[in-house]
């Protein structure tokens, strides 16, 4: 199934770049304009200049963010700011972080994985994608001929064969070890032992891998490969563009944290809000919870698990209470969702919100430009945005379990966009993969 290989990673020269915390950055899709500014100011060598270079008003065909990113990478390689490892390796990464007062360590492997079309079911997606982010990543691939940030994917290690190999490798000296921001810490080992690499490859060759984060990057890499093959007179199956950089994490890793995709809405008319409760009762049993001091702890417990029938907590219609929504009749509601989706898809909280509440109850569509839909991955932030008046309504959801993601992908279905948020994101700038 999945073919993985070691590669000669490109990374910062720590003799010249002493403070790695100041140069790594998040992946492109969560870099806000404010964060972009902060990253540019943090260091002249911050990786944002490659991962998500700044757009300028005067950008044009010959001078734009992609050409500037390419020029920057070339300059950093020539100056020795970036260096290419001499020996191919699989890079073992420990990502230490804190969430909700609890400390975690997530163990991942940075390696290159052979690109496969979706229909082969070797690499399996779980969410849908949009065209605009893919166009951006394809342009960056052509300019840099490099995967600057890894696609995050999941695999099964039920016999713990991979874990045993990695645990043995952790006895060696790491090549990267530093404390990052927000209490995070990164430790990286270069696994160069051919026997260890062979054992990892053999274990992963028996199974598919599941994309957790990076669907747009994977589809962009597929498109880039097709375009390269069209232009190439002759090419080998081992050409670098036939592979993509991935970070593989075990489904059972204790550091695998999946946050819920709470929905935030603004731009709803007063009339629609006034009619909303009556329309909700057509589909849901509605339980009102008074906004007492302990109600939020009750909500957190309610949403802590994904088990059972779909349930949603609605906040914003009243200043005195919130509402717990539970479907009255799943069978009838399921018929209102797209027929080609599975029953598992239709039982997801996020599917119920997107298809029943947003489309049927609120009658929202992509043509309603005055309505804004946003997302929050913490309950407190979602509630605060409603209390501040920035948004009118918050739909609070349960997190999706890893086994549900696998089940959806195994049957060839895809969840709605923004159904999961794997936390924290794998940083860009630790190690990346050159295609040229």
Image (cartoon, rainbow, N blue to C red):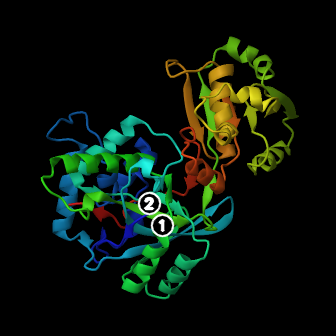
* Residue under numbered circle 2: 427
Residue drawn at (30%, 45%) of the image? 223
The C terminus, quarter of image: bottom left
Q: Earlier in the sequence, mark 1 or mark 2?
A: 1
Q: Position of residue 383 (x, y in %)?
A: 69, 38
Q: Is residue 377 left or right of residue 319?
A: left
Disc tally is: 2
User: Which of the pair 342/189 is nearer the observer?
Assistant: 342
- Tell me residue 382's x, y (percent): 65, 39
Q: Within the image, what quadrant is residue 243 found in? A: bottom left
Taking the view exactly as shown, the residue that stands out farthest to the top is 271
The N terminus is located in which quarter?
A: bottom left
How far apart are the alpha carbons under marks 1 and 2?
10 Å
Q: Is residue 316 above or below residue 271?
A: below
Quadrant of residue 6 in the image?
bottom left
Answer whether labels 1 and 2 touch (C-beta < 8 Å).
yes
Quick one: 24 or 255, which is closer to the camera? Answer: 255
Q: Secondary structure at mark 2?
A: loop
Residue ID at (50%, 88%):
171
Which numbered tag is attached to residue 180? 1
Asked whether the viewer can see residue 32, the reply is yes
- Which dot marks residue 436? none
Q: Position of residue 99 (x, y in %)?
A: 64, 60
For the residue carrying disc 1, how many other residues have a C-alpha within 10 Å: few (<14), some (14-19), or many (20+)? Answer: some
On the picture, is 330 further left or further right than 108?
right
- The local crowd at label 2, few if under 14, some if 14 to 19, many if 20 or more residues have their Cα within 10 Å, is some
110 on left or right of 158: left
Where does residue 321 sit, x and y in percent of width and height?
Answer: 83, 31
Q: Secondary structure at mark 1?
A: loop
């Amino acid at each position: 199934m999945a073919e993985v290989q070691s590669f000669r990673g490109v990374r910062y020269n720590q003799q010249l770049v002493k403070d790695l915390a100041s140069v790594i950055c998040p992946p492109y899709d969560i870099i806000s304009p404010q964060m972009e500014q902060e990253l540019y100011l943090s260091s002249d060598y911050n990786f944002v200049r490659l991962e998500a270079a700044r757009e300028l008003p005067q950008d044009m065909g010959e001078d734009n963010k992609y050409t500037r990113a390419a020029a920057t990478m070339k300059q950093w390689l020539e100056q020795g700011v970036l260096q290419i490892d001499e020996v191919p390796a699989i890079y073992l990464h420990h990502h230490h972080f804190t969430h909700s007062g609890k400390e975690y360590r997530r163990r991942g492997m940075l390696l290159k994985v052979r690109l496969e079309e979706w229909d082969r079911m070797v690499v399996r997606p779980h969410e849908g994608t949009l065209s605009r982010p893919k166009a951006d990543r394809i342009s960056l691939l052509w300019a840099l001929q490099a995967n600057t940030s890894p696609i995050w994917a999941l695999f099964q290690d039920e016999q713990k064969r991979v874990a045993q190999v990695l645990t043995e490798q952790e006895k060696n000296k790491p090549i990267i070890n530093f404390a990052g921001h927000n209490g995070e810490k990164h430790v990286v080992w270069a696994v160069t032992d051919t026997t260890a690499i062979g054992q990892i490859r053999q274990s992963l060759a028996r199974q598919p891998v599941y994309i957790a984060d990076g669907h747009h990057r994977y589809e962009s890499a597929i498109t880039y490969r097709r375009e390269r093959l069209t232009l190439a007179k002759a090419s080998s199956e081992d050409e670098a563009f036939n592979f993509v950089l991935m970070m593989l994490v075990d489904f059972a890793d204790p550091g695998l944290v999946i946050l819920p995709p709470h929905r935030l809405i603004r731009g709803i008319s007063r009339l629609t809000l006034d009619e909303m409760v009556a329309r909700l009762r057509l589909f849901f049993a509605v339980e009102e919870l008074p906004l007492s001091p302990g109600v939020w702890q009750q909500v957190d417990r309610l949403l802590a698990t994904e088990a059972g029938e779909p349930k949603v907590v609605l906040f914003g219609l009243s200043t005195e209470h919130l509402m717990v929504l539970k479907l009255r009749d799943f069978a009838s509601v399921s018929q209102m969702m797209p027929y080609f989706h599975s029953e598992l898809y239709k039982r997801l909280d996020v599917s119920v919100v997107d298809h029943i509440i947003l489309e049927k109850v609120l009658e929202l569509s992509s043509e309603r430009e005055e309505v804004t839909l946003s997302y929050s991955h913490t309950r407190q932030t979602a509630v605060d945005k409603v209390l501040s008046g920035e948004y009118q309504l918050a739909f609070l959801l349960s997190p999706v379990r890893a086994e549900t993601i696998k089940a959806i992908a195994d049957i060839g279905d895809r969840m709605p966009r923004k159904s999961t948020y794997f936390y924290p994101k794998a940083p860009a700038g630790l190690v990346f993969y050159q295609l040229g």
